[in-house]
Image (cartoon, grey):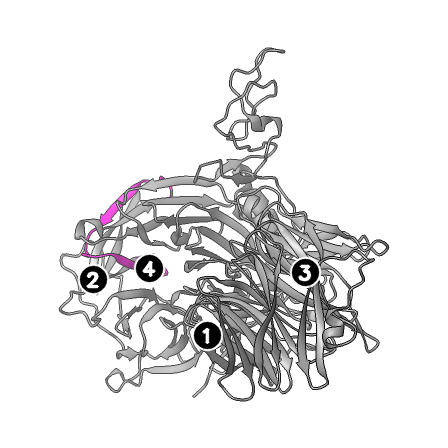
Amino acid sequence: MAALRFETCHVACSANRTPNVVSWGRGGTLAFGTCNSVAVYEPQERRVLSMLNGHTARVNAVQWVHKDDGAPETHLVSGSSDSRVLVWAVQNGKFVLSVECKGHTDAVCAVDALYAGTGILVASAAADSGVRLWLCGDAKEAECLHSLTFGGGFMMDVSLALLPGTKVPVLACGGDDSRVHLYTVQAPEKKVQRVTMLQGHEDWVRGVAWTSVGGELLLASCSQDCLIGVWRLRAKSGSGARARGDQDDAVIKMKEDVFGVEEQEGERVFAVALETVLAGHENWVYGVHWRPPTCEGGERCEPLSLLSASMDKTMVLWTPDQDSGVWMEQVRVGEVGGNTLGFYGCQMSPDASMILAHSFHGALHLWSKDASSGEWRPDVVLSGHFNAVQDLSWDPEGEFVVSASSDQTVRLFTTWRRSKPEGGRRPTWHEISRPQIHGYDMRCLATLGRFQLVSSADEKVLRIFRAPRNFLDNLASISGASREELLASGDCARLPEGASTPALGLSNKAVFQGKATVVLPFLLWPLKTPLLSLTGDLVPSSKDGEEKKFGSVSDQYPESYFKPINMTEPPTEDDLLQNTLWPEVQKLYGHGFEMSCLAADGGATVVASACKASKAEHAAVLLWSTTTWRQLQALACHSLTVTQMAFSPDGAMLLLVSRDRTWSLWRRHQAGPEPKYSLYARTTKDASVHSRIIWSCDWSPNGTYFATSSRDKKVIVWGPCTTDERGDSVAPRQVKPSSSILDVADSATAVAFCPRLCSDNSYLLAVGLECGQIIVYGWRPDGDPAAGRDWIQYGQTDSSQSHTLAVKRLRWRPRVGRAGVPGEESAWLQLASAGADHAVKIFDINVEAL
């Protein structure tokens, strides 16, 4: 049996909204938690290398296990809301689950690890008010050395290091008691003992991090009091009581906390003192990260600099002055304005040439240092949804993918063809536009031609958007498409330059060339400056010298939410939020409840919409004309919510599937200037093969057959459907199953026919399951349905390629080949999938074997 080869082309995802979820390895790769997975991302190649799927709930903490020599890491630790800590190891170039740590009774919020002898010492903090220390060896399960409890308190972060000149681990825990707790793990009994508590913060300690400098340890702690404390831990000269009493009364020193550690040679004494307090942030400081040590010429180099991230939307790079030793702010980067919250954490690349922060909405913010000028500039980095992706669609030419998510955004992804590709690398996928940023969770969308789309959310309204001219210019620059062809297809003469959303509004307003858009708050003030209207037109001024009776404070400093930008590379998160919206051209009202699904015919002449329904009167599907934007018809047939709809490739048929376990088929008639649809065929509950809700449906590329998939784990192909007859049908026809019942062993939540027929005229069908797996089957109409020989399984996604939650939508690229790759690509197909695990995935599927 021939097999298909699945290759993951692109994964669009974002970081979870927890502080300790991102870690930058010495090998240059970035690991971060996204929903229930850990993504391993290569910033230089700008692509996801692998997805580590092992957790069953949100990943809250990720940490590389660093090596002393600075070599690339081979182990990774992750903690999750499933109360488990997992250790991943590299084997044969791939990450595999090595050790599982079980013992916490609530969500794990922070982890850290270091190599200790032949094993790995792991520290984890959880919402069960406990901190646990684990020793991970070759066994599949770890040994819990000790469990620390803090009563009703919580530890927000943990950090491990080795005491200077010893092999004794020291653990720092920062918690909600505004203190930093220090513990040591002493051999041979592996006894865990609290040695001191560092006091100085006035609010919760959110982050702690150790670094080694000149044979001493520095500990950075950050807090909700907006301050960062730097503590120095050093070994005191002498031993025992002599070291404890080593004080020079003639020298003024900061108060030291002294503790001893028992070793074979005797007791060693260490002292911890506050080095400095860094004040520069204006809001809670959530993360600190030291510059990683490097190895130059075989010698360990320990440059001293500290990176901090705050909810004030900034990151600050702190360094001590070479002469005075005073810590000073060297670089400050971040966001200005916008409607986002602050940063949850920060990381620095191994060579300190890049710094990264992740924000409340999951976005990664990357800055790179220019080698010639030394300036820090925003750089291209991965982006994606931060909640379940509900729907997606390709444009008719197969050049970009548009997705809608419960994170209240619609995003557009395409390939970036660089002018100077490095080493012949293939183009990478990136988000280049965010057509809609809404105030309700998005539910569905449909494309109307190349540059128009309709979307709906939990608000009962359909909204139609059209691409602005600035988007067409940037699409041509980034993807390498012909600007002339794009502008010709986009009818650019009437297109606005961009769009902007006014304050407290949900509609994207068009902004035309030479005009600006500002937000006018409700506070009024007499001004002498001319006003700008919300549509971008200048408000005529009154007589010279006459004060305005109505005005706005913001008019003194107009805040433009859109400005045309000419992009040669994918935009940053700031530009995506403000400068890539599409203007809204129409609203359609008619449904009484939240929307459930949308569909549009291939000619972009009719839009079908359905809403949630518990009664037959609300389950009617509404048809809309795209020329007049008025309601054409209401198709009443089902008694419960219509879950998905699909027009046949020629637009002659409309298929509806419903929560009532039935489907209905409607045929198009041209009654005058506008089309009408009549019931062609349907199933009843008694005659339906499906016994549970029908989730998905799709048409074969020739429009002869259609497939349905259901919660009852069945996939069925129905047909043939003919459209030769003329006139309205008197009674519904019977369309029977053409295939045997395909049992996919799990709830089938998505189904999609490949637009290309195989050489033996068989069909390729992709099925998405509730467990997240995607399976591709071949179906032969001339097979033997009675014996079940008409189905052949050609391939499936493996554990690292699959989604971790239900597959919400599958869409094949409408053209053969791979987007952004010119030349003969007939051996390849592309499949896009949307998952409840927040991910949009694009797979390259090689069909040469077929």
Classify residue 480 by image quadrant: bottom right
Q: Which residue is mark 2?
A: 660
The image position of residue 678, as x and y in percent, is: 21, 53
- For label 4, the crowd category at 10 Å Cα-Cα, with few meaning under 14, some 14 to 19 and many 20 or more, is many
Q: Amino acid at mark 1?
A: Arg
Q: Which residue is mark 3?
A: 418
Sequence-wise first label, 4 or 3: 3
Element at badge 3? loop
- For label 3, the crowd category at 10 Å Cα-Cα, with few meaning under 14, some 14 to 19 and many 20 or more, is some
Residue that extends furthest to the right in the rendered view of this protein: 323
Distance between the alpha carbons at the discs numbered 1 and 2: 39 Å
Whether residue 648 is in magenta: the answer is yes
Foreground residue, 837 or 311? 311
Q: Amino acid at mark 2?
A: Asp
Circle 4 or circle 1, nearest the eye: 1
Task: Give, as a single range, the part of the protein colored magenta.
Answer: 626-652
Distance between the alpha carbons at the discs numbered 4 and 2: 17 Å
Sequence-wise first label, 3 or 2: 3
Sequence-wise first label, 4 or 1: 1
The image position of residue 546, as x and y in percent, is: 59, 11
Distance between the alpha carbons at the discs numbered 1 and 3: 42 Å
Distance between the alpha carbons at the discs numbered 3 and 2: 50 Å
Q: Amino acid at mark 3?
A: Arg
Q: Which residue is mark 4?
A: 646
Circle 3 or circle 2, nearest the eye: 2
Q: Which residue is mark 1?
A: 84
Distance between the alpha carbons at the discs numbered 4 and 1: 42 Å
Sequence-wise first label, 1 or 3: 1
The image position of residue 364, as x and y in percent, is: 58, 58
How many marks the image carries: the answer is 4
Sequence-wise first label, 1 or 2: 1
